[in-house]
Amino acid sequence: MPDILSIALVFLLAGFVKGVIGLGLPTIAMGLLGLWLAPAQAAVLLTVPGLVTNLVQMRGPAFLSLLHRLRWMLVGVVAGTAAGFWLWGGLGGRWASIGLALALMAYAALGLATVRPVLSPPAARRLAFPTGAATGAITPATGVFMLPMAPWLQANQLPRDDMVQALGIALFVSALSLGAALWWTGGFAGGAGGGSVLALLPALGGQWLGARLRRVLPEAVFRRVFFLGILALGSHLLWRSA
């Protein structure tokens, strides 16, 4: 029972952060669950909440246009995840986690300093597949679907709601790719996925609360909260990997 309550609180918190800034569920959940679970066990628990919360987030009027715009980046995520799982030999990779944490913190610092990356449409298209492939390759090492995908999305100069929806689409594909790799390697053997289904309810509850808060935040405040959240995620990942 203590483990069940602890897991529920972890997913409630992770879902709340995701509801506010559109991401963060894997980073927070992997970091906190890693205090008493192996990385592969934590990743299995994340599978269903990750898929469903991103499915909720990706709904919206701009879905088809965003899907068309992101298509080559998404193909890169799938290919990169498969290659990364083979490269890292499964989940894990302490030095990769430290590198990702430092990169997240640097990205957040630039954002808080109002340095905003901008890509022209042709440049964004050229970088779409490499961005997705790099993101996918990093994912199995860290359990985090963040870089360089988030800066690339921001450089596309999407409005706030479209940015959150685009993150939902990209993170859904990332979670699906990682879940498929875990299933292929036997990560769900012995009914291990049952706990992931149970973790869904607190994750959705937290996401709903966070989304309500996001809707009342002004654009400038949302931007600051977004980068402060990424800075906190990077700091947490660095602390977890140290």
Image (spheres, rainbow, N blue to C red):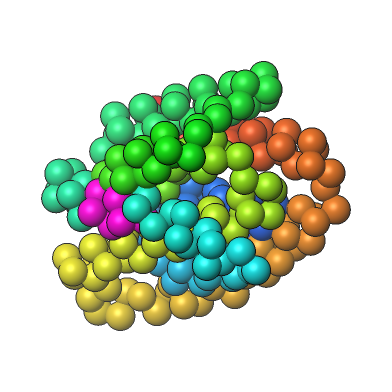
Residue depicted at x 39% and y 62%: 173
User: Of 72 and 11, which appears nearest the observer?
Assistant: 72
Q: Is residue 232 depicted above or below 78 in this figure?
A: above
Badge count: 0
178 left or right of 232? left
Task: Compare residues 238 and 112 and report the one nearer the observer.
Answer: 112
Identify the residue at the far front of this view.
122
Answer with left or right where residue 9 lies relative to residue 122: right
State whether residue 32 appears in this view.
Answer: no
The answer to whether 160 is drawn above or below residue 11 in the figure is above
Question: Which quarter shows the C terminus?
Answer: top left
- Residue 33 percent coordinates (x, y): 46, 53
Left or right: 88 as drawn, with respect to 121: left
Residue 50 % position (x, y): 47, 64
Residue 205 in view: yes
Q: Which span is picked out in magenta?
A: 74-81
Between 196 and 47, the one nearer to me in the picture:
47
Residue found at x 36% / y 66% = 176
Percent across and percent down for residue 52 are: 51, 72
From the viewer's perspective, tell me whether residue 92 is left or right of residue 124.
left
Query: Magenta span: helix, strand or loop, mainly?
Result: helix
Image location (x, y in percent) of residue 26: 47, 52
Q: As displayed, is residue 141 above or below residue 241?
A: below
Which residue is drawn at the image coordinates 35% and 39% (left, top)?
Answer: 126
Q: Is residue 115 magenta?
A: no
Asked if residue 78 lies in the magenta stretch, the reply is yes
For image coordinates 30% across by 56% down, the residue present is 75
